[in-house]
Image (cartoon, coloured by chain):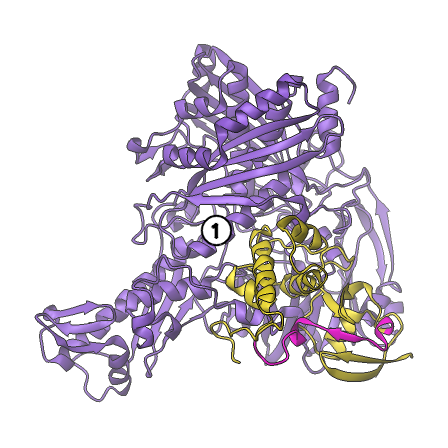
């Protein structure tokens, strides 16, 4: 069985994995990183999106062995200090989630979008998130949230730590 | 300043950000598939690859010896462990309810019908072992076309259901044929309301843990944990009190999780047999294949009118695809719309018939709106067709026939009493937001210059009935249960508040909006209220979430339970303040003696005195708690005006939704942010039916759209921004004046979008485009109008 070395949300892991194991199943079943979810198995919905070396990938179409030697960031590792990343804060502020199932992937895709294009137009946001499906929101408030996050990040190049929403223990 | 002083004077009406978000945006979620228990086995289901066939043999023996496999069982092996899955609505005396076992034993009836299961130590081992099961199915000709299904000599899905006819139903209101004789104009149309796949983003998942002697805890991705508890007891014979059902985080439902599924029975029965925790999680392909589908009707409609545009009568004949089996509510869904076909218009006669047909496809059942989108589609399309026939503006025809705001309450031809509404106000606002007149000018200009990209404007002035439902009505229509809802409100010893609701949310923000209601009713800070739901042990009484009922029914129970708590606290306050109860005033959470407001006790202070019970007034019991069960007497009737603008490329057939305005009247609003979100999502789901989505089976009964590769759930790039606004005509039938909003957007938007497409193409002789209005369908409609072959 191949052995992989992978850093997930700042923690180094060394594991033997079956070659057929998908990255999302490695994250969920082996590491207990259940914040990342499976939505479609065919890389259409983007619910499983994580960052691999800073670039968004759909972890249901990446083999765990392909993650060898990489750094993976999931929604659970997005904000190291226990606060919220500006994109997470914006999703809360703009009511950009309802059931919340697509949200981890949507947030990670939005983080990647903004790192490539810090000031996207609404049209660019919609096309940038084309690979992520949401069944609840009609995307309206997701676009608003990404816009807010872009403004927030532009306002503080060093991205001040955002406050906690009600109910989030710091 | 204290927290109490900082909070809004009233919570109700405030755009509180959601309580629910904290764990969802940080990945600290509790989806059923996240659950892992010691010794847990994974289940995989072997499914029929043919649509219709007789099971000759299923041999699981080769699977049993494979690595990790603990059990492999066929439908025959488990036939004595369970009974038929339930159907809860006997819609007619002639309804046929054939047996529906969780795993098939005699025949398979659709591609995906389960025939055997494997339980193994890993998901991979379970899936691998399915390959080792040998089975022989003798294929039978599949029944896939509803019109052919009823012909004599057609193959039978169920051997004892002649002509595949599940039920027939008719209603007559007024004298339709008399209107036909008087009519100056008669318009007839045939619509295909296509089959849809609900596509909640979270695939279904079930985990069952044995917890004692024939006792179990089931976590399931469901809208209806209370239903699941009752029906699992009936299906498996396990005593109801021994089954605890928990709906943890649930990733969307849209009706598809208002269901009792085979896999819930399978996991429960395997947990009982094997004595260890069992988990099943569907793949997206399974979600497409074996989670219920929506819609799928052929709708014949005929409208009679006079030349001046006054409508007289409406006749609707429906043929509804049940699929292979009746799931929980299957036969009732087309009929849930039966009162809504006349919409907001003053018809004098209305005939309706409906025939339910069995086919070799997945069962249909409730999908967002459940019968009402189908009805609204017909009436709103027909009003446009009537206008076109008369050469009138579609708005003018609507104005001429709708119920004016000063005519409420109004009893429609279908017998429903609409309590309130203001169609004029909603329409005026929508027109203003859209810039209707300017767009009509733009449309005329494009027509004049023969632009290849034409503009279309679609109108939908919808209403719906929600707040399911009055128990008496449910009983009269053949439903097995009631439609009430329960709540418990208790003030804890330290003054904090627990609200227990029998509804079970999956994205609708109950934890936030119900806390707002209780905070106002008790006069306590929003932050001090927690909402408990979705667990038959901690919220034991309830009828769950569907039909836009949570607020209009469940919210009322919270209001009533809160009132009981206040009444109890008032008695204690009188005792503490040493005055007569009639002299106690309650305002903003404080009890005071009339005339001396300084001597006051908050309900939160009184909670501890009630808890210690050291000095209670005579006859009073300890603890500030109140329970209430609310059973509505009538439905509520949201309404609104939606306007869609499309650009249609007459050369490629491509339709682009360019603009969308939704003005809804859902009565009083608890949280405008949440309401707007419901409208956004609902509108897009309805537009998705109009423009993008269709479940397609091939001629052998294989689901062609078996994953998101082929089933086109729209992405953000497919859609424009949606403009929303509200008018507010309070419901007169409940104390909060609320109506419900969960389904409104979906009900309204499908006809708005299709009307826009047809409006764009009207000059080309097109008077209908079959949904979804894909480039191919638009091209076919144009080609047919030009006299070409389809």
In the picture of the structure, the residue carrying the numbered disc 1 is B676
Foreground residue, B63 or B289?
B289
Which span of residues is magenta-colored?
A: A65-83
Q: How many labels does the image show?
A: 1
| Chain identifier matching the yellow colour in the rendered picture | A
Tell me if residue A107 comes above or below residue B753 in the rendering: below
Q: Is residue B501 left or right of residue B108?
A: left
Q: Residue B778 appears at what percent x and percent y?
A: 71, 28
Foreground residue, B468 or A13?
A13
Residue B93 visible in rendering: no
Residue B354 visible in rendering: yes
Q: Residue A85 appears at what percent x and percent y?
A: 60, 71
* A72 in magenta: yes
Q: Residue at x 53, y 80 (%)?
A: A170
Q: Is residue B610 left or right of residue B652?
A: left
Foreground residue, B18 or B336?
B18
Q: In this view, does B785 lie to the left or right of B512?
A: right
Quarter of the image holding residue B94?
top right
Q: Residue B311 appears at what percent x and percent y?
A: 43, 20
- In the figure, the shade used to draw chain B is purple
Quarter of the image holding residue B636?
top left
Q: Which residue is drawn at 65% across and 55% down?
A: A120
Q: Residue B654 appears at what percent x and percent y?
A: 72, 33
Chain assignment, label 1: B
Which quadrant of the rendered structure holds the N terminus of chain B?
bottom left
Tell me if residue B554 comes above or below residue B595 in the rendering: above
Quarter of the image holding residue B3?
bottom left
Foreground residue, B637 or A86?
A86
Q: Which residue is drawn at 30% across and 31% down?
A: B407
Q: Looking at this rendering, what residue extends furthest in the right direction?
A: A1
* B85 in magenta: no
């Amino acid at each position: 069985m191949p052995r992989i070395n992978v850093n997930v949300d700042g923690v180094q892991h060394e594991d033997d994995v079956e070659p057929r194991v998908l990255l999302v199943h490695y994250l969920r079943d082996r590491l207990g990183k259940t914040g990342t979810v499976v939505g479609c198995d065919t890389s259409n919905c983007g619910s499983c999106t994580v960052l691999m070396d800073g670039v968004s990938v759909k972890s249901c179409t990446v083999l765990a062995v392909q993650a060898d030697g990489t750094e993976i960031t999931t929604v659970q590792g997005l904000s190291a200090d226990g606060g919220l990343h500006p994109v997470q804060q914006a999703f809360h502020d703009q009511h950009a989630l309802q059931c919340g199932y697509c949200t981890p992937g949507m947030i990670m895709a939005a983080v990647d979008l903004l790192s490539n294009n810090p000031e996207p137009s609404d049209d660019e946001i919609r096309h940038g998130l084309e690979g992520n499906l949401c069944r609840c929101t009609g995307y309206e408030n997701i676009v608003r949230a990404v816009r807010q996050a872009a403004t927030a990040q532009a306002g503080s190049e060093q991205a001040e730590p955002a406050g906690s929403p009600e109910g989030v223990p710091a | 300043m204290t927290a109490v002083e900082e909070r809004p004077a009233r919570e109700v009406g405030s755009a509180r950000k959601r309580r629910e978000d904290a764990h969802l945006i940080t990945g600290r979620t509790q989806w059923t598939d996240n659950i892992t228990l010691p010794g847990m086995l994974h289940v995989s289901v072997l499914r029929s690859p043919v649509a219709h066939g007789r099971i000759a043999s299923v041999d699981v023996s080769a699977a049993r010896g494979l690595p990790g496999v603990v059990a492999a069982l066929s439908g025959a092996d488990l036939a004595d462990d369970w009974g038929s899955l339930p159907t809860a609505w006997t819609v007619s005396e002639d309804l046929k309810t054939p047996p529906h076992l969780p795993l098939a034993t005699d025949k398979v009836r659709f591609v995906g019908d389960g025939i055997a299961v494997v339980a193994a130590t890993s998901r991979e081992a379970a899936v691998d072992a399915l390959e080792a099961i040998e089975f022989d199915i003798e294929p039978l000709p599949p029944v896939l076309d509803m019109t052919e299904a009823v012909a004599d000599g057609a193959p039978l899905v169920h051997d004892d259901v002649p002509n595949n006819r599940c039920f027939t139903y008719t209603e007559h209101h007024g004298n339709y044929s008399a209107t036909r004789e008087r009519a100056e104009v008669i318009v007839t149309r045939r619509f295909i309301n296509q089959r849809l796949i609900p596509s909640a983003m979270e695939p279904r998942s079930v985990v069952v843990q044995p917890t004692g002697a024939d006792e179990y805890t089931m976590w399931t991705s469901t809208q209806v944990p209370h239903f699941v508890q009752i029906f699992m007891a009936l299906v498996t014979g396990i005593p109801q009190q021994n089954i605890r059902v928990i709906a943890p985080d649930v990733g969307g439902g849209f009706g598809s999780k208002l269901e009792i599924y085979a896999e819930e029975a399978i996991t429960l029965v395997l947990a009982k047999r094997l004595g260890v925790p069992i988990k099943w999680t569907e793949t997206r392909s399974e979600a497409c294949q074996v989670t219920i589908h929506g819609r799928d009707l052929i709708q014949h409609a005929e409208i009679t009118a006079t030349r001046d545009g006054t409508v007289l009568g409406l006749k609707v004949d429906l043929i509804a695809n049940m699929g292979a089996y009746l799931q929980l509510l299957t036969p009732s869904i087309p009929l849930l719309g039966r009162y809504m076909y006349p919409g907001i218009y003053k018809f004098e006669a209305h005939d309706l018939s409906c025939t339910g047909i069995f086919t070799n496809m997945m069962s249909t059942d409730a999908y967002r709106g459940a019968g009402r989108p189908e009805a609204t589609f017909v009436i709103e399309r027909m009003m446009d067709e009537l206008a076109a026939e008369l050469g009138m503006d579609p708005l003018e025809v609507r104005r001429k026939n709708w119920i004016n705001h000063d005519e409420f309450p109004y009893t429609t031809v279908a017998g429903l009493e609409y309590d309130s509404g203001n169609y004029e106000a909603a329409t005026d606002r929508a027109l203003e937001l859209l810039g209707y007149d300017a767009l009509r000018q733009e449309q005329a200009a494009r027509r004049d210059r023969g632009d290849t990209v034409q503009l279309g404007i679609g109108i939908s002035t919808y209403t719906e009935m929600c707040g399911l439902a009055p128990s008496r009505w449910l009983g009269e229509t053949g439903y097995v249960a009631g439609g009430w809802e329960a709540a418990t409100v208790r003030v804890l010893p330290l003054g904090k508040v627990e609200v227990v609701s029998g509804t079970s949310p999956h994205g609708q923000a109950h934890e936030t909006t119900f806390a707002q209601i209780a905070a106002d009713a008790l006069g306590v800070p929003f932050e001090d209220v927690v909402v408990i739901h979705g667990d038959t042990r901690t919220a034991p009484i309830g009828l769950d979430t569907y039909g836009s009922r949570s607020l209009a029914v469940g919210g009322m129970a919270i209001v009533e339970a809160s009132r009981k708590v206040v009444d109890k606290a008032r008695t204690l306050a009188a005792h503490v303040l040493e005055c007569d109860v009639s002299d106690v005033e309650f305002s903003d959470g404080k009890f005071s003696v009339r005339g001396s407001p300084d001597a006051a006790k908050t309900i939160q202070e009184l909670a501890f005195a009630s808890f210690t019970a050291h000095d209670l007034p005579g006859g009073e019991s300890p603890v500030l708690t109140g329970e209430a069960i609310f059973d509505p007497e009538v439905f509520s009737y949201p309404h609104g005006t939606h306007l869609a603008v499309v650009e249609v490329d007459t050369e490629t057939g491509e339709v682009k939704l360019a603009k969308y305005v939704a003005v809804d009247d859902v009565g009083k609003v608890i949280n405008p942010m949440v309401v707007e979100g419901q409208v956004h999502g609902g509108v897009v789901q309805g537009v998705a039916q109009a423009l993008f989505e269709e479940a397609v089976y091939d001629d052998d009964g294989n689901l062609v759209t078996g994953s998101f590769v082929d089933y086109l759930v729209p992405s953000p790039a497919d859609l424009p921004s949606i403009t929303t606004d509200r008018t507010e005509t309070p419901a007169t039938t409940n104390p909060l004046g609320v109506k419900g909003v969960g389904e409104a957007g979906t009900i309204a938007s499908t006809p708005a979008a299709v009307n826009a497409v047809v409006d764009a193409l009207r000059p080309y002789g097109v008077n209908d485009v079959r949904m979804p209005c894909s480039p191919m369908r638009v091209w076919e409609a144009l080609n047919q109008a030009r006299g070409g072959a389809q």
